[in-house]
Image (spheres, rainbow, N blue to C red):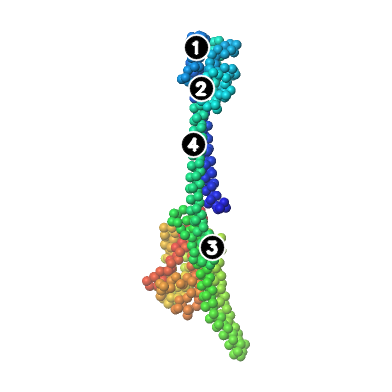
Amino acid sequence: MLKRTPLRLAATFTLLFAATVIALFAILFYGLTARLTNEIHIDVEQAMNALLSVDRQRSFDDLVAVVTSESSSVRDSDFIFELVDEQGQHVAGNVRNVKYSDDWLTLERSQIEGDWDAEGEPDDRFYAIWRPVSKGRLLVGTSNGDLRQTQTFLLEVLGIGLIATTLLGALCGAFLARQTQHRIDAFANTLDAVSAGQIQARVPMSGSGDDIDHVGAQVNRTLDHLQTLIENVNQSSSDIAHDLKKPVGRLRQRLDIARRSARTTSDFSAAVEDALGDLDAMMITFDALLRITQIEAGARRARFANVDLAGVLDDVADVYMAVAEDAGHQLAWPNGRWKPATVRGDRELLIQLFANLIENAIRHCPPGTKISLMLHDEPQGFRAEVTDNGPGIPEEEREKVFRRLYRLERARSTPGSGLGLTLAAAIAELHDATIVLEDGAPGLRVMISFPAATEDA
């Protein structure tokens, strides 16, 4: 239990809170003690001044009478007095033989000789001071009984308050630690489930929107991405086995026919050329798969810089206008921007993204199709569009076409590996962009929304 972070944090905060209470009490205790001690000194000084005025205004004998009267008074039973003559002999007062000092004296009750019957505790102390008079010296003092009672009361309050504070802090800490531990256990259980193969497991959210929920959302996003990667790998393995089985079989058939029926060198060379063509197509497919894997792993983020998206579309349009025209299509790019559309990314990959989308439209649309590039401002960034007025993609197929090696039934007769849109989607995800396919009515509209580059990027 002591190794659990929430419990240790709860104990630490409880101790810190208790230490804070003790520190505040110490300031209060010593401040109040100093204040009450000063008031005791003031009371003694006032009593002393009153007696000194008797000596000055009347006579020493009158002072003796007043001191004798005050010593036996029950009004201030905790005051002590001693009047001595010039030879130091006791003349009047309720105490005797108190040592002389020019400074304030602190006397223990048990150390004072006297015949006064003062109420108080044996542990009381007396604050007293000597002053010269006309024919000797006068001592006046009083006990710290009120001060000591106040101190005792404060200590009792501290004890009760400290116990209550510690118990309350411990209970609150234990409750919070239990809640936090429960949520931490949810993380651990989720990760254990994922490691056991339950890739769909997710960290439950409390809905409070606190830091733990924020971390949980990040973990869930990571698990979503991991699940997507695993599903892509599984799907890719199946698709590779399915889609490459046919060209590998065709390659073997051609080589077998060449081995059995080739009669001349030219016949054998032609068969080898066909086989090499099939191998080149397979190599292109594997290169594309490797490129997609590298992009999905984020290996190209180190090359990111501020890129003008309008400039990227300018370069792509310059290259593919002639390509589209040769294929019997029309590529339009009405660039009217007067300011850059700056995003954070890899310029080479962004060119690859739009090139794939345009090539996909050229390859799968009939002659005479109009293909358009557009760029729009959005509140948080920019939206690029590639549209055509071709046959489009059925709504139920629009998510599937992003899968590796997936091809529409009507596209299986055209050249290609089925990786163009997969690569486009991987590049968009690497750039934190969202790619969406919509009905162009007619045709297809591909929209990619990019976040704008931040000023400190």
The answer for how far apart the CA atoms under marks 2 and 4 are is 28 Å
Circle 3: element type: helix
Q: Amino acid at mark 1?
A: Ala
Q: Earlier in the sequence, mark 1 or mark 4?
A: 1
Which of marks 1 and 2 precedes in the sequence? 1
Q: CA distance from mark 2 to mark 1?
A: 20 Å
Upstream in sequence: badge 2 or badge 3: 2
Mark 3 or mark 4, earlier in chain: 4
Dot 1: what SS? helix
**Residue at which label 2 appears:** 118
Tag 2 secondary structure: loop
Q: Amino acid at mark 3?
A: Asp
Residue designated by label 1? 65
User: Which residue type does callout 4 highlight?
Assistant: Val
Q: Is residue 190 above or below residue 105?
A: below
**Residue 246 vs residue 208, the one in the foreground:** 208
The residue at which mark 4 appears reads as 157
What's the mark number on residue 192? 3
Disc 2 from disc 3: Cα separation: 77 Å
